[in-house]
Image (spheres, rainbow, N blue to C red):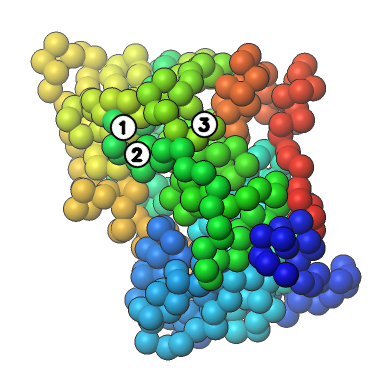
Amino acid sequence: MRQKDRINQPTRREFLKTTASAAVAASISRRAFGANERIGIGMIGLHGIGGMHLGQYAKMDDVDIVALCDVDQSVRERAASTLDKKPMLTSDFRDLLDMKEVDAIVVAVPDHWHANMAIRAFEAGKDAYIEKPLGHNIREGKLIREAAQKHGRIMQTGLQQRSAPHWIHAVERIKNGEIGKVHAVHMWNAWNRTEMRGDMGKPPEAPIPDGVDYNMWLGPAPAKGFNPAHFHDYWYFFWDYSGGMISGWGVHLFDIVQWAMGSDIRGVTTEGGNYVLDDLRDTPDTSVSVFDCPEYTLHYTVRHGNGWRPHGDMDHGIQFIGTDGVLEINRRRYQVFRESYRDSRIPDITEPRYNDGGEGGGGYTAYRIHKRNFLDCMRSRKETVAPPQVGHIASIPGHLANISYRLGRTVHWDPKNETITGDPEAEKMMTREYRRPWAL
């Protein structure tokens, strides 16, 4: 049977057949590692950021990369060639969960797979590093949080800014009231047409490339013929697999805002469209989201048509606007503009002025610190700096903004009960339909 003909067929085996077997698997791995004991890592998703994760974990003295999983044979074989020891190779992530040598998985795949892989890993007694956003939709974030708690697992969300010194210091200054009462926050991502993966064009459907397990790549998403614009670099911009910049990149910025300001969002209105890029994408190339928050307003803009950047290098960033000053921050640095001498336009830049070779709080040093925190917490069984609750809460604003955009109206949110109010159609978009056998 050709691979394309298998798209709607159930996958080859069930994962765990009974609740009892899941409980036994979890109890086996619920332990703290000794100081000199090596941790076995299974990597899932090796293209792009997954390759960076692989390179960093491979250099850690207390880690063994024991298995690699990617649906693209060429990608996983190329990744394996960078390692000194030959790992197990597969296109089916469940093979990793069956391995006693795997203590934790690292997931860097399209968003539509995050929840399935995380929850099944917890059931199998594995800890997990899960890239952001925590789920494809709001319900998935809840399910991940509940599963991690139920099975006593350690999880780190890929919100590495939480581990970078200058983000930590900036949040402390805001919480300490150094810029006064914060009443407005502005976030932005700004690129031109050739940046942030550029224009994907309008390619037609094509044969499935040799060595690609496309049925597994689709997973819980709807069955569709293979299109190169959906695969590898461009899945980010299709509702079936992700939520574009608003939920996929904005989550980093939403996380910092909620860390500093709290998470009691009450509603959001998003407007925008595809005004610049004439290609296949679903998600907008230009958008503005305005959030109603207690005692302040949050404003987030995304644009792919013009790369103009405040202060020269801030293609992304956050401005916290307080009564006594403005704190402006991105992954390169932060600076404070005092209201008392605003006419001078000279920032009051205080230590630490953090710059990691142009990468800063989202770069390679932050990633290394974030990974080390995950491994240390696997040993101590203490909560990571970005546990499931943090990842879930940080992901909610982007999902809500996308729902508002797709429906063309304001969405109202009840943060206490974590639900959309007064709009059944919007509430249905807090979850999705799942292709068999991947229902959650």
408 or 410, nearer to the observer = 408
Label disc, if present, on residue 418 of the rendered structure: none
Q: Residues within 10 Å of mark 1 (few under 14, many from 20)?
A: some
* Left or right: where 3 falls relative to 338: right
Residue occupied by mark 3: 283
- Pointer 1: what residue? 193
Q: Secondary structure at mark 1?
A: loop
Residue type, label 1: Arg
Q: Earlier in the sequence, mark 1 or mark 3?
A: 1
Please name whichever residue, 60 or 171, is drawn nearer the observer in this view of the structure: 60
Outermost residue, top direction? 343
123 left or right of 395? right
The part of the image, by quadrant, that contains residue 113 is bottom right
Q: CA distance from mark 1 to mark 3?
A: 15 Å
Type of the residue with mark 2:
Gly
N-terminal of the two: label 1 or label 2? 1
User: Label 2, on which residue?
Assistant: 198
Q: Residue at x 58, y 22 (%)?
A: 405
